[in-house]
Image: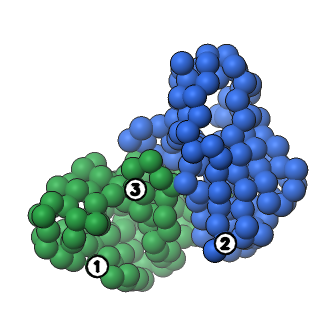
Amino acid sequence: EDQVTQSPEALRLQEGESSSLNCSYTVSGLRGLFWYRQDPGKGPEFLFTLYSAGEEKEKERLKATLTKKESFLHITAPKPEDSATYLCAVQAPGGYNKLIFGAGTRLAVHP
Amino acid sequence: DAMVIQNPRYQVTQFGKPVTLSCSQTLNHNVMYWYQQKSSQAPKLLFHYYDKDFNNEADTPDNFQSRRPNTSFCFLDIRSPGLGDAAMYLCATKQGAGETQYFGPGTRLLVL
């Protein structure tokens, strides 16, 4: 069964304290792994798509990496405005690109 | 700016009283999705439209229906809401073979 597991469930950081979020997945034929940011009471905001092991993408303080079994979202020198829930999703095989989401990591960055 | 719009942002309904949630998009995408997200849980796909073709997930309750009268609009109808249907409902769109789904802000549904 296709599955996505994110860890930790919650993470508290001090401003400037770098860390990584993990997304482990099992899917029969990965067609893409997606990272979204979700602020409280809002819809997910697209961050990155990764397609193959070894691929990396960066945006400001965020960097996403992909291996054959997991993805990491590295946050370098985070700021309070980076506080949000970060969702990972994999695209399952099929004609309509169904996304299977993890439950997310709730990140809180304190000044 | 092109975007996905959901109305209302907050909806309160009574147990068993039908409710309709609305999604519109200015992206001209041909695929539209409805997800249900309960507190601290992953979004769960309910159904999607590829153009006019409707596709229901196997575990979506019969209580949930959808309509897509045109490319821009899609509606989620909950025929007899129960307390367990209280959740955030997210609409997303995607263009054809493109990979990325773009989400609206969501509608928070409360069932009293």
Q: Is residue A28 above or below residue B84?
A: below
Chain under disc 2: B
Q: Nearer the viewer, residue A84 or B61?
A: A84
Q: Colour of chain A?
A: green
- Residue drawn at (52%, 35%) of the image: B87
Do the residues at pointers 3 and 2 share their chain? Answer: no
- Residue drawn at (44%, 66%) of the image: A35
- Residue drawn at (47%, 37%) of the image: B38
Q: How many marks?
A: 3
Res A47 label:
none
Res A39 label:
3
Image x and y of residue A22, in percent? 30, 62
Image x and y of residue B81, in percent? 64, 23
Q: CA distance from mark 3 to mark 2?
A: 20 Å
Counting residues from the start of the chain, the first of labels 3 and 1 encountered is 3
Query: Does residue B54 show up?
Result: yes
- Supply the letter of whichever chain is blue: B
Q: Residues within 10 Å of mark 3 (few under 14, many from 20)?
A: some
Chain under disc 3: A
Image quarter in which the N terminus of chain B is found? bottom right
Q: CA distance from mark 3 to mark 1?
A: 17 Å
Q: Which residue is mark 2?
A: B2
Q: CA distance from mark 2 to mark 1?
A: 26 Å
Q: Which residue is mark 1?
A: A61
Q: Amino acid at mark 2?
A: Ala
Q: Nearer the viewer, residue B109 or A59?
A: B109
Do the residues at pointers 3 and 1 share their chain? Answer: yes
- Residue drawn at (66%, 72%) of the image: B2
Name the element at disc 3.
loop
Q: Amino acid at mark 3?
A: Asp
Quadrant housing residue B77: top right
